[in-house]
């Protein structure tokens, strides 16, 4: 089976991390986020992939080249201006080699999922569907596409990002399309799969089916989700064939250093050449390459960008620090705060109010 990877988005919700790197290439447990999906697709029998790129397209070629490193064949279709999810699928289809009746796997580029691709394909074939969507259950469907289904799995509606979703069953961002359905998507303009193509196919009475599986699933589109995905890969709550060497809830990459009296755990990645000083505490966090957490600092559920420096005694909880930033001693940053790359926060500049 051939696959199209949707990797052209700007990843705005993950700024500032995505200012320099597209979301699917952010390092997660030691490899680009996308690599976890690529190896799962390969294990399910996918050999040839078309990357639908736009934002910082050349970085994908640098990271994956022709795919041979991963035992895959990868080709690239780049949109000068982003064409939307379905426009991107249509544009990438020019590089497919299969016939009109062949199934084409389409994947959002920011998903960690352990669902059974074979079973999804089997369901697609059995129903002779135009499209079969992987559906999963979430607590709050407002950030996703809500997809109610009939008892036989037939999709009844597609309601993208509604304040009042009709169900908690959502589009998990992994589709199998009949090739001829892709060829019907209008060419050369912006088209949304979620707002235009799926509702249009349903209105036309096309057989769209849901494949429901509640396996591990996460959309890594926000800082909180990014931290959760990375820590789940390190603790083993999510298994990926490309994660190796994690021990006691810590993944230490080449040249990383953790001082003897530091406490590091809860699914933390310490990037290449990153350092954690004496008596520092780092929990469920991601330290990108070269990041430094000095002595006595505390970092919880946070992402520390490349070569950023967290000075002695600073406290960080649920925050994102951009590449090369310095957080001076004694600062206390919490609750979704984001520091832009290169910023130098003076000592004691920000404190969190405990009175609120
Ligand atoms: N090539 C290309 N061109 N790719 C795009 C474009 C584009 O114009 N726009 C978005 N993408 C890619 C993104 O890079 C990402 O990998 C994928 O399409 C989905 O975009 P997101 O921005 O992550 O969408 P979302 O998370 O808000 O919602 C989507 O995913 C949810 C599941 O995670 C929707 O498909 C929802 O219905 C779904 O529930
Ligand atoms: Mg997403």
Image (tube, rainbow, N blue to C red):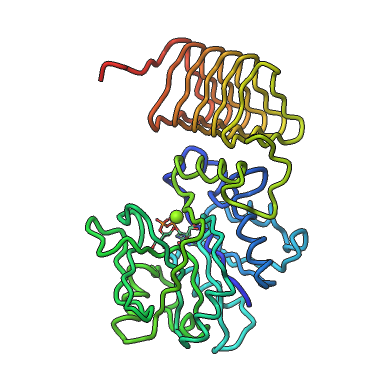
Can you say whether 328 is above or below 117 in the image? above
For image coordinates 55% across by 17% down, the residue present is 297
Q: On the rendered image, what quadrant is the N terminus found in?
A: bottom right
Residue 175 lies left or right of residue 235; in this view the side is left
Residue 150 lies left or right of residue 25; in this view the side is left
Q: Quadrant of ligand 1?
A: bottom left
Tell which of 21 and 204 is nearer to you: 204
For image coordinates 37% across by 81% down, the residue present is 152
Q: Position of residue 144 (x, y in %)?
A: 36, 58
Residue 88 lies left or right of residue 308; in this view the side is left
Instruction: Decide if residue 13 is in sight here.
Output: yes
Q: Position of residue 284 (x, y in %)?
A: 54, 34
Q: Position of residue 191 (x, y in %)?
A: 39, 70
Residue 272 sits in which quadrant? top right
Can you say whether 90 is above or below 64 in the image? below
Instruction: Decide if residue 62 is in sight here.
Output: no
The residue at the far left in this view is: 164
Residue 135 sits in which quadrant? bottom left
Residue 286 lies left or right of residue 70; in this view the side is left
Q: Position of residue 33 (x, y in %)?
A: 59, 50
For image coordinates 64% across by 62% down, the residue present is 40
Q: On the rendered image, what quadrant is the C terminus found in?
A: top left
Count of marks overlaid on the render: 0
Tell which of 2 and 215 is nearer to you: 215
Can you say whether 89 is above or below 56 in the image? below
Can you say whether 87 is above or below 263 in the image? below
Tell which of 349 and 312 is nearer to you: 312
């Amino acid at each position: 089976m051939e696959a199209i990877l949707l990797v052209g988005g700007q990843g705005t919700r993950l700024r500032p991390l995505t200012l320099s790197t597209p979301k699917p290439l952010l390092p997660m447990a030691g490899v680009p986020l996308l690599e976890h999906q690529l190896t799962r697709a390969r294990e399910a029998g996918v050999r040839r992939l078309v990357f639908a790129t736009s934002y910082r397209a050349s970085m994908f070629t640098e990271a994956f080249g022709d795919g041979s490193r991963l035992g895959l064949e990868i080709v690239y279709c780049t949109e000068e201006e982003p064409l939307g999810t379905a426009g991107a699928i249509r544009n990438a289809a020019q590089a497919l080699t299969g016939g009109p009746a062949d199934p084409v796997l389409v994947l959002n580029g920011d998903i960690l999922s352990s669902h059974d691709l074979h079973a999804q394909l089997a369901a697609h074939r059995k129903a002779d569907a135009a499209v079969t969507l992987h559906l999963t259950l979430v607590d709050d469907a407002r950030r996703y596409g809500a997809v109610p289904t009939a008892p036989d799995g037939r999709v009844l509606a597609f309601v993208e990002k509604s304040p009042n979703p009709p169900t908690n069953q959502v589009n998990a961002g992994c589709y199998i399309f009949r090739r001829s359905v892709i060829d019907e998507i209008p060419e050369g303009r912006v088209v949304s799969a979620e707002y235009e193509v799926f509702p249009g196919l349903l209105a036309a009475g096309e057989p769209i089916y849901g494949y429901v599986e509640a396996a591990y699933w996460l959309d890594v589109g926000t800082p909180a989700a990014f931290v959760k995905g990375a820590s789940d890969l390190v603790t083993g709550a999510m298994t990926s064939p490309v994660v190796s060497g994690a021990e006691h809830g810590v993944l230490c990459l080449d040249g990383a250093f953790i001082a003897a009296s530091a406490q590091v755990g809860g699914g933390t990645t310490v990037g290449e050449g990153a350092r954690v000083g004496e008596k520092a505490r780092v929990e469920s966090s991601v330290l990108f390459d070269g990041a430094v957490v000095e002595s006595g600092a505390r970092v919880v559920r946070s992402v520390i960008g490349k070569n950023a420096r967290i000075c002695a005694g600073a406290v960080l909880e649920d925050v994102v620090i951009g590449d090369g930033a310095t957080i001076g001693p004694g600062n206390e940053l919490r609750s979704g705060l984001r520091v832009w790359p290169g910023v130098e926060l003076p000592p004691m500049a920000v404190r969190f109010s405990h009175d609120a």
